[in-house]
Amino acid sequence: MGIHIITDSASDIKASERENLTVIPLTITFGETEYQDGVTLTHKQFYEMLIESDTLPVTSQIPPFLFEETMKKAVAQGDEVIVITLSGKLSGTWQSAMIAAENYPGSVYVVDSENVSIGEHILVEYALRLIDQGLSASEIVKMLNLLKKRIRLVALLNTLEYLKKGGRISGAAALAGSLLSIKPVIAIQNGEVVVLGKARGSKQANNLIVEQIHTAGGIDFSMPYFLGYTGLSKDLIQKYIEDNSALWENETDYLPVDSVGGTIGTYAGPGAIGVAFVAKEN
């Protein structure tokens, strides 16, 4: 008996080379055309279309039957299944997974990551590590639910324009932010997006991210960690890595960088950067 992990494309995990990991795509709709996130619409194509579009695309949760298709196949092979979804407070995808799992009591477990994107990716990567260590599915689920409370995702937005388009802020606030070079710093806390502060200029915003890392107690480099960026260029995240080398230069010589897809990119817009890590235990 093996253990199969299922996650959604909001984790921004590209097509997996591991046989025991399946990434199910959310749907992204531009106008009247639907795309499968990361399958029929790459991250690059998404941002090209987002920049050209006057209105925001619509993202749709994964329906239960898509989860059930993969669950059924895995269980038929004798595997147990652990589903790791984006935050249930941000999408109905977690609820869809719960509905599908009702058909496989004792064989399928569902974990709400209470996160998204690179934060969700951490939990998936940790689950795969635990499988390789030989833990049982129930043991892994218990450890995932503990670890997710220590995951921090902090991000810097380059523009308020897409928050305005999505109705999250007023047009006047977006204009004022643009004129004052306001860079909002956001985080995922208790499964929801919160604004930690608004910095004037990128340097002050970078400092705010570093401050949040220190406030959390620092990065636990024994656990998975990821950096992420939105848009078509890695330039901003590379500059961030160079400017803040003191955070990791004595800890690691490898920093995994993910491109962030449509689930978060729709509202963050291009030019955002983020850091996701596991906070050190006190």
Image (cartoon, helix red, strand yellow):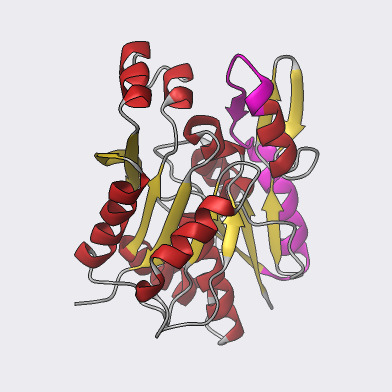
User: Which residue does the image show at 46% across and 66% down from the upper left?
Assistant: 242
Is residue 244 toward the left or the right of residue 218 in the image? right
Closest to the observer, 75 or 232: 232
Whether residue 189 appears in this view of the structure is no
Q: State which quarter of the image contains the C terminus.
A: bottom left
Q: Residue at x 29, y 61 (%)?
A: 210
> Where 27 falls versus 179 (above or below)?
below
- Rendered location of residue 169, percent (x, y): 34, 20
Tell me if residue 242 comes above or below residue 207 in the rendering. below
Q: Position of residue 88 (x, y in %)?
A: 43, 41
Look at 42% across and 50% down and name the residue there: 115
Position of 207 with respect to 249 (left or right) is: left
Left/right placement of residue 59 relative to residue 220 reads right
Q: 84 or 262, which is in the foreground?
A: 262
Q: Viewed as shown, does residue 139 lie left or right of 56? A: left
The answer to whether residue 33 shows anywhere in this view is yes
Q: Is residue 110 above or below residue 224?
A: above
Residue drawn 32% across the image and 12% down it: 172
Count numbered badges in the picture: 0
Quarter of the image where the N terminus is located: bottom right
Q: Report x, y in % for residue 137.
A: 53, 73
- Residue 124 at x, y percent in the picture: 55, 64
Q: Is residue 277 magenta?
A: no
Along the line of sight, the residue nearer the viewer: 223 or 132 = 223
The span picked out in magenta is 50-79
